[in-house]
Image: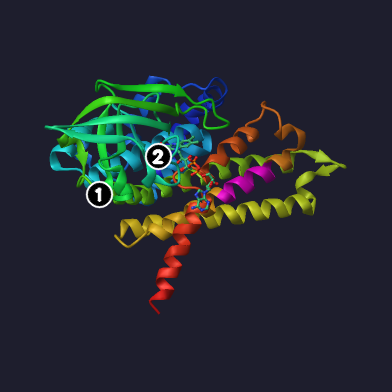
Amino acid sequence: MVQKNIRKFAAESLDEWANVLDRESKPLPAEIVREMGRLNIWGIQAPVRFGGADLDTISYAIIIEEISRVSAAVGLGVTVHNSVCLAPLLKFGTKEQIERFAPDLASGKKIGGFTVTEPHAGSDMASIQTTAVPDGDHYILNGQKTFVTNGGIGDIFLTAASVDTGKKAGGIAIFIVEKSMKGFSVGKIEDMMGMRGNMVSELFFNSVRVPRENVLGPVDDGFRISMQTLDIGRIGIAAQALGIGIAAFGAAAAYAMERKQFDRPIGTFQAISFKLADMKTLLDASRLLIYRAADHKDRNLPFSTESAMCKLFASEAAMRVCMEALQIFGGYGYVKDLPVERFFRDAKITEIYEGTSEIMKIIIGNAILKEFSRL
Ligand SMILES: Cc1cc2nc3c(=O)[nH]c(=O)nc-3n(C[C@H](O)[C@H](O)[C@H](O)COP(=O)(O)OP(=O)(O)OC[C@H]3O[C@@H](n4cnc5c(N)ncnc54)[C@H](O)[C@@H]3O)c2cc1C
């Protein structure tokens, strides 16, 4: 039912926008953002009393896949808002924080983000330089963030800052920062290769006074909170990659049976049908890895390694599927009249954000070493 409803919404309301957002690098119209609120898309796993849909993580993955099939840029905004802003707020927030921020986020009245990355701190989050200095009932935040998904349109940002840079990971705290706070500003919107419908931006913190009650979780527990948050987020990024791959595969399979060369559909050449066979297998394997990670999360089993595995596999699978889809389209895959080149551009970043493929292998590798060192 969830899949059917979201597929219908995506076909009727998003499809006409997907190319426009990409070409013109602009955000979704406010009316569609509101429509998504009515469909509970901004509060997929939030409790019903806050205006959410209270769905399980498999349903969440299905929603992200369906939206990303049509517009990966919109899928990005939705997954980040839900999984790395609203989810950690609900998981680590105090009762007061949840009552205060969850209703507006779950209804889509306010859009959320999660901001860790800085010019000199990407994969190595522990080296962030944004500082948070205590001042009475407040912390004073100073610093700069880069590549913030939803940055240009967001209202609430979970922001990593260091209360003691000498302590590296042990000094990081997460602050709930609101756009309206004095000293907060949005920098340039990135001119990107893909995901152009998301207003990914810089953010600046110039002596922003953040009340102590806006610290999420214990003050020096921000690194652990961030790692657990990214475990959740990666299931969404994997589902996004799957959605892009499914779109590219569907287009390529249809084209393979329609396009004739040497008096026969190109799909009847074994070279092409073998590509389709590989693509389908990669996508089905991605889906199963995603559902396994989601199922572990829903059953309160450890899912950090499973989440890294599904993100690693699904993002690399999407990239390969998009590359083969473009090849099947020949020259027509290379021009902007058809969406295949957009799928290709959108797919690439799934191997990079919320932890690169190399970092996923470190996480998976460390888990293996830990398991076998116990034997
Ligand atoms: C469109 C977009 C949206 C984003 N959204 C957000 C967001 O909302 N919030 C946010 O905080 N960040 C966001 N990011 C940032 C993203 O998470 C980072 O780009 C990513 O984590 C990689 O960091 P980096 O770009 O600094 O690369 P680096 O960390 O400098 O890495 C460069 C290369 O070195 C490799 N490398 C680094 N360390 C190691 C190692 N130990 N072993 C092996 N290889 C290594 C990497 O895998 C990579 O190939 C976004 C980025 C983009 C482009």
Residue 317 within the magenta-colored segment of the rendering: yes
Q: For this rendering, which residue is in front, 7 or 184?
A: 184
What residue sits right under mark 1 in the picture? 221
Residue at point 60% right, 33% down? 342
Q: Amino acid at mark 2?
A: Thr
Front position among marks 1 and 2? 1
Q: Which x, y percent locates residue 123?
A: 45, 46
Beta carbon at label 2 within 8 Å of ligand 1: no
Residue 100 visible here = yes
Q: CA distance from mark 1 to mark 2?
A: 23 Å
How packed is label 1: few (under 14 Cα within 10 Å), some, or many (20 or more)?
A: some
Residue 168 as seen in the image, left or right of residue 307: left
Q: How many marks?
A: 2
**Image quarter for residue 291?**
bottom left
Q: Amino acid at mark 1?
A: Asp
**255 within the magenta span:** no
Q: Position of residue 86 (x, y in %)?
A: 29, 39
Residue in the image at 75% along x and 49% along y: 272
Residue most extreme to the right:
262
Q: Is residue 365 left or right of residue 41?
A: right
Confirm whether residue 253 shows in the render: no
User: Which residues are the magenta region?
Assistant: 316-325
Above/below status of 354 relative to 288: above
Instruction: Name the foreground residue: 118 vs 329.
Output: 118
Q: Quadrant of the N terminus?
A: top left
Q: Quadrant of residue 164?
A: top left
Q: Of marks 1 and 2, which one's residue comes earlier in the chain?
A: 2
